[in-house]
Amino acid sequence: MEYVTLSNGVRMPQLGYGVYQVSKDECERCVLDALKVGYRHIDTAQSYFNEEEVGTAIAKSGILREEIFLTSKVWVEHYGYEQTKASVYESLRKLKTDYIDLMLLHQPFGDYYGAWRALEELYGEGKLRSIGISNFYPDRMVDLCSFSRIRPMVNQVETHPHNQQTEAQKWMQKYGVQIEAWAPFGEGRGGLFTDGTIAKIAAKYERTVAQIILRWELQRGIVVIPKSVHIERMIENFNVFDFALSDEEMAIMATLDKKQSSFFSHTDPNMVEWFVQMVEQRKSNHDHSKDKKKW
């Protein structure tokens, strides 16, 4: 396993296992499988509705809690100082742990300043070992870094060969923020898994396209959290530390950048309106797990 060291000195495994869109019925089994494979970094979120299953799997695994790097995220409807604090304590309860290794603000909307003050306080109390953000474009990240007591340590953003975030990564490096990729495969959109350029590199190393993508991201210093419900894919995604791409191959991969999201833009006013409407709807929806998600 390779690690990155965050700005506060905390070591974070560079490869993790994400549970976005893993159902409550499958989640416990999947996390146990991932831990058996060797993953020691698990990424969940309040909005994934599977924190309890993640916590149960970790407890059942028999692995010491301090050997696992656990990430969760505060959802936007819980923003604001008091609500964020309450939601983090609820996440701690569901995850069956006294601390969370990394807590992120999931979206750059609403009262994220109030939410950030809550994370700063919980960080100071030792409930959170590190704190960060997700989906913050460079302008909002610089804003938060500039006017907060504690700078975010991580920014988790959509990053894959078709949306490489090279300029955003430069801004993160300037402010000491570690880049982390959600959707490191872009969910295969735009024919990514059948891309001939990547396939040619994969053939040379007798690897899969997915393994080449992960290796490319790791060599860029990016933390990655691929997800699969199949243990054979978990094993495949984990076996990316025994080879390296050449400088020429890294340059070839760079040519695949389309410099745009494969999903949506957080700067699109229509998208912001959608988030507002969705939050209002969820306030009266008791079965949140049935919500249609775009994030």
Image: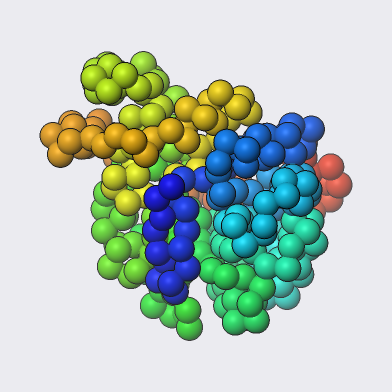
Q: Is residue 248 above or below residue 77?
A: above
What residue is shown at x 55% (from left), y 41% (from top)? 38
How is the protein colored in the picture?
rainbow
Q: Is residue 57 left or right of residue 207?
A: right
In the rendered image, which quarter is residue 209 located in? top left
Give coordinates of residue 41: x percent, y percent: 55, 50
| Side of 195 where 250 appears, left or right | left
Depicted 66 relative to depicted 34: above or below: below
Residue 239: x %, y % from top left: 43, 33
Task: Pick out the residue farthest to the right.
Answer: 286
Q: Residue at x 31, y 55 (%)?
A: 169
Viewer-closest of 241 and 199: 241
Determine the residue positioned at 59% across, 57% down: 67
Please determine whether, in this image, residue 89 is positioned above or below residue 124.
Answer: above
Decide which of 110, 11 is in the foreground and name it: 11
- Going 62% across and 62% down the picture, which residue do you hit? 66
Tag count: 0
Where is residue 175 drawn, in percent x and y? 33, 70
Q: Is residue 170 visible?
A: yes
On-image quarter of the C terminus: top right
| Pick the front one: 208 or 283 | 208
In the rendering, at what x and y percent does residue 247 appear?
15, 39
User: Does the rendering let one see residue 143?
Assistant: no
